Amino acid sequence: MLDRSHRSEELLTARLSLRRPVPDDIDAIFAIHSDPAACLHNPSDALSKREEAMELFQRWDDHWRRFGYGYWVVRRRDPGRTLGFCGTKVVDLNGMSVLNLFYRFEVSSWGQGVASEAATAVVEWVTERVPDLPVIARVRPANTASQRVAVRAGLVRAEHLDTAGEDGLDWIFAKNLLG
């Protein structure tokens, strides 16, 4: 399912191209993260100013520089606009280093399997390259669509790790969890 390109910063799936973000993506970061529907379950992620998107891009870029992976820009393989973002970043969960799986897409792409396809590619890629760290997704209990994406990407519920997040209870889904 996943083609490896010559550049480690691009993933290709049947329908999608995922690549490392560049400064030209800041407008798309702002557009998607300022859409109240896209941030409905995570309102603390909502952006209100383009400068915040610039800061978010910088954090994403810093992660890429430090670890060699991070959040990807997701587009259809045929040239088109940015559909959203999907990737992992190193975070602490209950004193354990894990890779947090993130996905956020423009509303017009919902219901087409785009998030599941992108998340599956990212989980496959990062599991192969960073096998020591579990992959987790933090999902609001009411966000059933996000729960389905996590499961389709190969994660399973890890109820014992559920925790309070910025926007309420985080249900944890995990892959390669030790112990």
Image (cartoon, grey):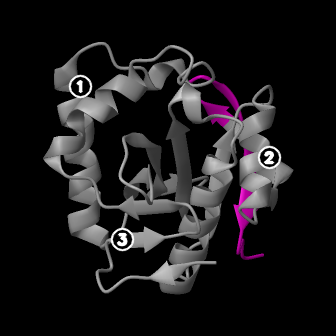
Say whether disc 2 or disc 1 marks the residue closer to the N-terminus. Answer: 1
| Identity, as a three-letter code, of the amino acid under mark 3 | Glu
Say whether disc 1 or disc 3 marks the residue closer to the N-terminus. Answer: 3
Residue 116 colored in magenta in the image: no
The percent coordinates of residue 1 (x first, y second) are 64, 78
Residue 170 colored in magenta in the image: yes
Say whether disc 3 or disc 2 marks the residue closer to the N-terminus. Answer: 3
Which residue does the image show at 30% across and 73% down from the upper left? 68
Nearer the observer, disc 1 or disc 3? 3
The percent coordinates of residue 81 (x first, y second) are 36, 41
Which residue in the structure is indicated by mark 2? Answer: 148
How far is the residue under mark 2 from the one under mark 1? 29 Å
Q: Is residue 162 left or right of residue 66?
A: right
Main secondary structure of the magenta stretch? strand
Q: Is residue 62 above or below residue 144?
A: below
| Identity, as a three-letter code, of the amino acid under mark 1 | Glu
Question: In this view, which residue lies farthest toward the front?
Answer: 78
**Secondary-structure class at tag 3:** strand
Which residue in the structure is indicated by mark 3? Answer: 10
Q: Is residue 161 left or right of residue 94?
A: right
| Identity, as a three-letter code, of the amino acid under mark 2 | Arg
Residue 95 visible to the viewer = no
The percent coordinates of residue 166 (x first, y second) are 54, 26
